[in-house]
Amino acid sequence: MLQVPFIRQNKELVLERLALKNFKETGLVDEVLALDDKRKRLTQEYDETQAQVNSLSKEIGKLMAQGKKEEGEAQRAAVNALKEKLGPVNEELNATEKALHDTLVKLPNLPAAIVPPGKTPEENVEVRRGGDIPTLPADAVPHWDLAKKYQLIDFELGNKITGSGFPVFQKQGARLQRAMIQYFLDFNLDNGYTEYAPPYLVNETSAFGTGQLPDKEGQMYHATEDNYFLIPTAEVPLTNIYRDEIVKDTDLPIKMTGYTPCFRREAGSYGKDVRGLNRVHQFDKVELVQIVHPEKSFDALDEMVAHVEKLLNTLQLPYRILRLCGGDMSFASAITYDFEVYSAAQQKWLEVSSVSNFETYQTNRMKIRFKEANGKPQLTHSLNGSSLALPRIMACILENNQTAAGIPLPAVLHRYFGADKIA
RNA sequence: GGUGAGGUGCCUGAGUGGCCGAAAGGAACGGUUUGCUAAACCGUCGUACGGGCUUAAACCUGUACCGAGGGUUCGAAUCCCUCCCUCACCGCCA
């Protein structure tokens, strides 16, 4: 969430940036400031009264110790009078703090200055492309047909076991998936990331920390019996590793990677966009998270973008990188780059990675801070990105590489897959 | 699921009503000493939100925080209630 002192000192900028994000409820900004004023006023009133109570109480203690009973009794009455005043003030203060928090949480992160204006995905700005779009044979088919032909994925079986959107990978399909996970993790480890295998269910506090709660509740599967949420991305447990920590500045940057399945309800998605692997409720992903010094976060962002790009290059897939416009960015992000690969048989671009800088939006919720040698604690910045989401990568590999004599795989996967092609 | 114990600062750990924001030890940081390492000695060693002073910081000051929330009391780490969590043993199970 945003920091109130920042809002106070930069109100015009805040309003300007919220407009860039196409955020309508700008009245919340004034509401936040008014509530914060009220909070300060009540805090002062409470503290001053409480200070009197405290000092009087000390005196009573001394009087009692000296055996001056009557004087003590008189003081007691005075303290009780003060306390009667204190109760309502405290109640109002608590209510105000809660209202402030609840209002603050409704404000999205501010987009960075270089975020392009716009409301829809069409207004995202293409930064660059790489790889070559293949020319497929005339009889080329989409990945769901290839999956059937080579017995890689059984979508119907998933329907039986769970429901729509839970594909069953099998045989070479299952092995290809495992090969990619291994390769992606190794690639990340080689580039200085530390590997984690985090829990797949998180508590409310963690889901709040990264911004899934309160507003995106409907997108997560909820284990209500225990009040746990199935993670929609490893970002949630990985970033929360450092929740409520104050690290040394020399510990930064913290670079984490982890493989997890991801669970998304995707309520309201139907039609051909959800065909095959295009959109599923459970999928595998290898994630990157960085916790960095606030002055270094844009360098870290560039580094992560370059990292994901390098990984995509080794897979020899045609891709493009988009800088998302204000209206298409997520609530918590200050700037996001999406990576899309070209699915040659479907003739469409599929998102396979999203790399974002959240600046202090998440870390303020989680209180992830750092301290310099003699300094005060300051919020770090957090970033994350996928490297990569597997289903769509698999879809593209299958479609783009298909030949009459099987599906050759990128060289980097051979040793993990145990063969150079699917046959 | 059952029974029992417990949640105190970076860690260990003392503290059963006022002198406790909290002993002691360790770690860490700064310094002295030292050929280097080690040791020894000295010092520092919480966070949040207010107020004052200030260009700002430092500093001074108030309040809160000993798992969370509520209660008793003039006064709570300490007593009471609720919740959460951890650990041990038993049961069950991968």
Image (tube, coloured by chain):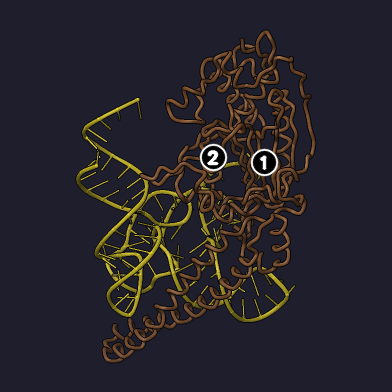
Chain colours: A brown, B yellow
Query: Measured along the vertical axis of the image, is residue A387 above or below residue A7?
Result: above
- The answer to whether residue A291 is left or right of residue A61 is right
Q: In which quarter of the image is the C terminus of chain A?
A: top right
Whether residue A411 appears in this view of the structure is no
**Residue A60 spot, x, y in % from top left:** 33, 84
- The answer to whether residue A289 is left or right of residue B67 is right
Mark 2 nearby-residue class (10 Å; few <14, some 14–19, many ≥20): some
Q: Which structural element holds mark 1?
A: strand
Please identify, in this view, whether the residue under mark 2 or under mark 1 is nearer the observer. Answer: 2
- Disc 2: which residue: A266
Residue name at image x 58 percent, y 13 percent: A150
Residue name at image x 46 percent, y 49 percent: A204
- Disc 1: which residue: A355
Of residue B42 and residue A76, the one placed in the foreground of this image is A76
Pinpoint the chain carrying mark 1.
A
Q: How far apart are marks 2 and 1 (CA)?
A: 20 Å
